[in-house]
Image (cartoon, rainbow, N blue to C red):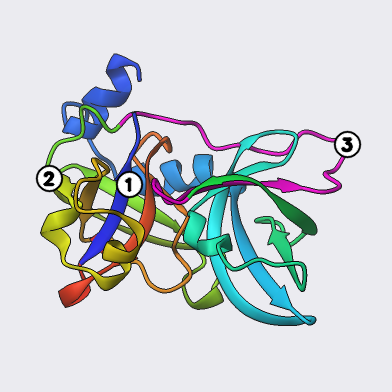
Amino acid sequence: MDATQCLDVDERSQAKARGDLPMTRNSIADAVEKAAPGVVNITIYSHHQPTSSGSGFLIDPSGLVVTNAHVVAHVSRHSSITVTLENGQKYEATVHSFDTKADLALVQLNDPPATKLPTVAIGTSSSVRAGEWVIALGSPLSLQNSVSAGIISATARRGSELGSALLSSLFAPSHRTEFLQTDAAINVGNSGGPLVNLDGQVIGINTMKVAGGIPYT
């Protein structure tokens, strides 16, 4: 069971997500083409050895990346962060800020290129309905530029419904973070990557897979 955190555009975007516009054989591929250039892999090194990895996505052309806080939670003065772009370019990075209660973090590339980096458009999760098509992008098992697709299985899941040990460690029972349940496959390494709609807009952040293998965002 997979978990994706909700995010809060235009009428056409919402219509396509609802299925009011025809879905073609290229709909998913077109959405991936829009979003994928802004998706990154995040690897944590300790004493020059990789210790963990996750995913993220660029929200600012200057090199600001959104990911899950738990992806970078154990970074210390003995650790370093390497962000790998879709094209394979690697950059050292630092944690800009994080919110452990929301399990969100911002990571900044230390020496971004002079040219503007591609970003992923931000959509909204407020109008998402069960049954809509969604796409998960990221680096499961360190396999960068991976894509999986599925539907929204349920909206507005509360943490208390999920029963995950990881979830319990991240969120208090009273915490109001809501999750989207999806059957788009995610795995270790997908954490922090985007869940996008058919317009390639981020509607959630892939967070975890809990009992039964069901993903949540």
Q: Which residue is mark 1?
A: 5
**Element type at marker 1?**
strand
Residue 182 percent coordinates (x, y)? 21, 55
Name which of mark 1 and mark 3 comes first in the sequence.
Answer: 1
Check residue 13 in the rendering and tell me which mark sits there, or answer none.
none
Q: Residues within 10 Å of mark 2 (few under 14, many from 20)?
A: some
**Element type at marker 2?**
loop
The answer to whether residue 185 shows anywhere in this view is no
For residue 95: magenta?
no
The answer to whether residue 44 shows anywhere in this view is yes
Amino acid marked by disc 2 = Gly
CA distance for labels 3 and 2? 42 Å
Residue 22 percent coordinates (x, y)? 21, 33
Amino acid marked by disc 1 = Gln
Q: Which residue is mark 3?
A: 114
Instruction: Give the camera-side residue of 162 and 136.
Output: 162
From the viewer's perspective, is 142 left or right of 101?
A: right
Q: Residues within 10 Å of mark 1 (few under 14, many from 20)?
A: many
In this rendering, is residue 20 above or below 102? above
Q: Which residue is mark 2?
A: 131
What residue is at 30 percent from the left and 19 percent from the top?
12
Instruction: Give the camera-side residue of 182 and 48.
Output: 48
What residue is at 18 percent from the left and 42 percent from the top?
132
What residue is at 66 percent from the left and 38 percent from the top?
118
For residue 119: magenta?
yes
Name which of mark 3 and mark 2 comes first in the sequence.
Answer: 3
On the image, which quarter does residue 78 sit in?
bottom right
Question: Which stretch is magenta?
Answer: 100-124
Residue 97 percent coordinates (x, y)? 61, 43
From the viewer's perspective, is 115 left or right of 125?
A: right
Amino acid marked by disc 3 = Ala
